[in-house]
């Protein structure tokens, strides 16, 4: 029997629609599979990152109790390694006692520290004065003139803080401070250090600054008391299966002598 031309064309069109539909369904299947794989990868990455963060936080808390008990945590060259769940964590503790607190130390020590990290004497004296201006209330600069004029002359839209520094980074707001000088200062500064700087000799920039201040005259070093507390920076770097990394740092105060002064362990800040 001969198929009419019209029926043949209709059958061919129907076949074309079926094939097109099958192709579209196959494409959708590939897209859905690809999307599912991407979402699965994102979920795994988020899970591993959360595990690394939790492990870093847990390792810091473990290190706190180790330090309180008189144990050793680790140094930059020999970190303490602990496994928490799927994470491997390296923990390092650094005593803040050898650093200089820009909120409490004298101008003489600040000037000596700046000189020790390679700043020329005139600029060191200028920056030490600006640090003192920031932390002291008042309109008159220790360098002479008005504080606001220093900031206005540098085209800055703000003035001296007239309060203690909230962080070492805030020192970068000073009119004559540069990122390079701040980077050189950063390892030797801590706003959490309490009491006199525990630095012996002149082997480090802090030691050199203290020696220079003592040679300049008595009473020019700093607060003039020895803290009974121990201030430590504890840093934990966690890695989960080599896919997720997380670094947590905390400043921890340990009470050297138990009493009614507060908790034996106190986290001053998490970073």
Image (cartoon, grey):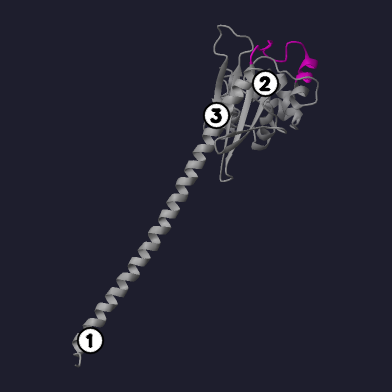
**Tag 1 residue:** 8
User: Residue drawn at (80%, 16%), measured in percent from left and top?
Assistant: 215
Could you classify mark 2 by the number of other residues whose Cα lies within 10 Å: few (under 14), some (14-19), or many (20 or more)?
Answer: few
User: Residue drawn at (47%, 43%), measured in percent from left and top?
Assistant: 46
Q: Which residues are magenta?
A: 210-229
- The answer to whether 241 appears left or right of 44 in the picture is right
Label 2, secondary structure: give it: loop
Label 1, secondary structure: give it: helix
Upstream in sequence: badge 1 or badge 3? 1
C-alpha gap between disc 2 and disc 1: 90 Å
The location of residue 42, given as percent across then percent down, is 46, 48
User: Residue drawn at (33%, 68%), measured in percent from left and top?
Assistant: 24
In the picture, the disc for residue 71 is 2
Nearest to the observer: residue 256 or residue 115: 256
Q: Quadrant of the C terminus?
A: top right
Upstream in sequence: badge 2 or badge 1? 1
Task: Considering the whole magenta stretch, tell me its main secondary structure.
Answer: loop
Q: Answer whether residue 30 is magenta in the image.
A: no
The location of residue 189, given as percent across then percent down, is 66, 26
Label 3, secondary structure: give it: helix
**Tag 3 residue:** 58
Could you classify mark 3 by the number of other residues whose Cα lies within 10 Å: few (under 14), some (14-19), or many (20 or more)?
Answer: some
Determine contact: label 3, label 2, CB under 8 Å.
no
C-alpha gap between disc 1 and disc 3: 75 Å
């Amino acid at each position: 029997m001969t198929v009419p031309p019209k029926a043949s064309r209709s059958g061919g069109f129907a076949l074309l629609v079926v094939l097109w539909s099958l192709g579209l369904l196959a494409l959708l299947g590939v897209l859905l599979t690809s999307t599912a794989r991407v979402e699965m990868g994102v979920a795994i990455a988020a899970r591993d990152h959360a595990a690394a963060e939790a492990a870093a936080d847990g390792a810091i808390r473990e290190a706190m109790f180790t330090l309180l008990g008189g144990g050793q945590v680790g140094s930059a060259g020999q970190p303490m390694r602990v496994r928490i769940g799927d994470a491997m964590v390296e923990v390092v503790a650094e005593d803040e006692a050898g650093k200089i607190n820009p909120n409490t130390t004298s101008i003489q020590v600040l000037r000596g520290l700046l000189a020790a990290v390679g700043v020329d004497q005139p600029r060191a004296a200028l920056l030490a004065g600006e640090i003192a201006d920031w932390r002291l209330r008042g309109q008159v600069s220790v360098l002479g003139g008005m504080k606001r004029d220093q900031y206005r002359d540098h085209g800055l839209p703000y003035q001296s803080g007239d309060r203690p520094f909230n962080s070492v980074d805030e020192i970068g707001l000073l009119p004559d401070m540069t990122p390079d000088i701040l980077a050189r200062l950063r390892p030797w500064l801590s706003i959490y250090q309490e009491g006199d700087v525990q630095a012996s000799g002149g082997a480090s920039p802090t030691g050199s600054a203290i020696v220079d201040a003592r040679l300049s005259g008595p009473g020019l070093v700093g607060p003039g008391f020895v803290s009974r507390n121990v201030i430590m920076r504890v840093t934990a770097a966690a890695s989960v299966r080599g896919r997720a990394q997380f670094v947590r740092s905390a400043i921890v105060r340990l009470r050297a002598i138990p009493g009614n002064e507060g908790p034996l362990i106190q986290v001053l800040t998490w970073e």
